[in-house]
Amino acid sequence: MKDKKIRHLKGRGVSVPGNDIDTDRIIPARFLKEITFSRMGEYPFFDERFDSSGKEKDHPFNTNKGASFLIANDNFGCGSSREHAPQSLLRWGIQVILAESLAEIFAGNCAMIGLAAVTLSSDDIREIQAAVEADSSLELSLDLMTKTVLCQGKEYEVTIPEPRRQALTEGTWDSTALLLERLELSRSTAAALPYMSHFSS
């Protein structure tokens, strides 16, 4: 089975400045009616990226395609708890979110799909945003083992709840993969449950 451990990540950054960027801005509600996540990567910040005719506007997700680190400010991912928001970011190519703070449910939804969402101080975020906005080719790296981000040779300390960090670094964030890996144990456990056999002996 593919190794699910997420410990060290590298990539270019995209800065999306502003506080209280909610899940409706990340993915507009009309896209939630799709029954799979397969096309979610097309929709992040859709109404801010395109005009009514479908022409691209001047948005960081249009000018920094291929970036995998999203740098955000305070209370990123607030609003409704739609899991489509982190799904859309991940499928667009985002692997790491660096923010001043994260909405709790949004951060939990990120961890459940292997998207590393961490927080830094306001000053550190602004430094990294300024660096990325000045040079879109700049590479960032996140080390979840030491809980640090490296940008332009400077190391920044990140914060992430320990259960989420462990789930990512130990590869236990993927609950479906865990169930498949222990399929026979799951079947034998299910067979021993009386309500699975209608309480017949």
Image (tube, rainbow, N blue to C red):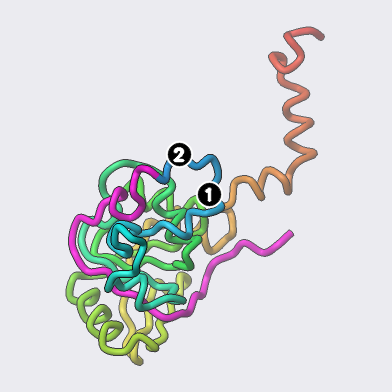
> Does 104 sit left or right of 108 as displayed?
left
The quadrant of the image that shows the N terminus is bottom right
Q: Position of residue 30 (x, y in %)?
A: 37, 43
The residue closer to the viewer here, 96 or 36, is: 36
Residue depicted at 42% across the width and 54% down the height:
86
Residue 164, percent from left and from top: 44, 55
- Is 170 within the magenta? no
Residue 8 placement, left or right of 53? right
Question: How many marks do you count on the picture?
Answer: 2
Q: In this picture, is 199 found above or below 138?
A: above
Q: The C terminus appears in which quarter of the rendering?
A: top right
Res 98 label = none
Is residue 39 in sight in this rendering? Answer: yes
| Residue extending furthest toward the front | 53
**Amino acid bearing label 2:** Lys
Q: Amino acid at mark 1?
A: Phe
* Residue drawn 22% across the image and 65% down it: 73
Residue range of the region highlighted in magenta in the rendering = 1-30
- Circle 1 crowding by C-alpha within 10 Å: few under 14, some 14–19, many from 20: some
> Which label sits on residue 37?
1
Could you tell whether 158 is left or right of 175 in the image? left
11 in the magenta segment: yes
Which element is circle 1 on?
A: loop
Residue under label 2: 33
Residue 184: x and y, percent?
80, 39
- Please state the horizontal and vertical placement of residue 87, each as a whole percent of the image: 47, 54
Q: Residue most toward the bottom?
A: 153
Mark 2 nearby-residue class (10 Å; few <14, some 14–19, many ≥20): few
Q: Is residue 103 visible?
A: no
Is 125 above or below relative to 5?
below
CB within 8 Å, label 1 to label 2: no
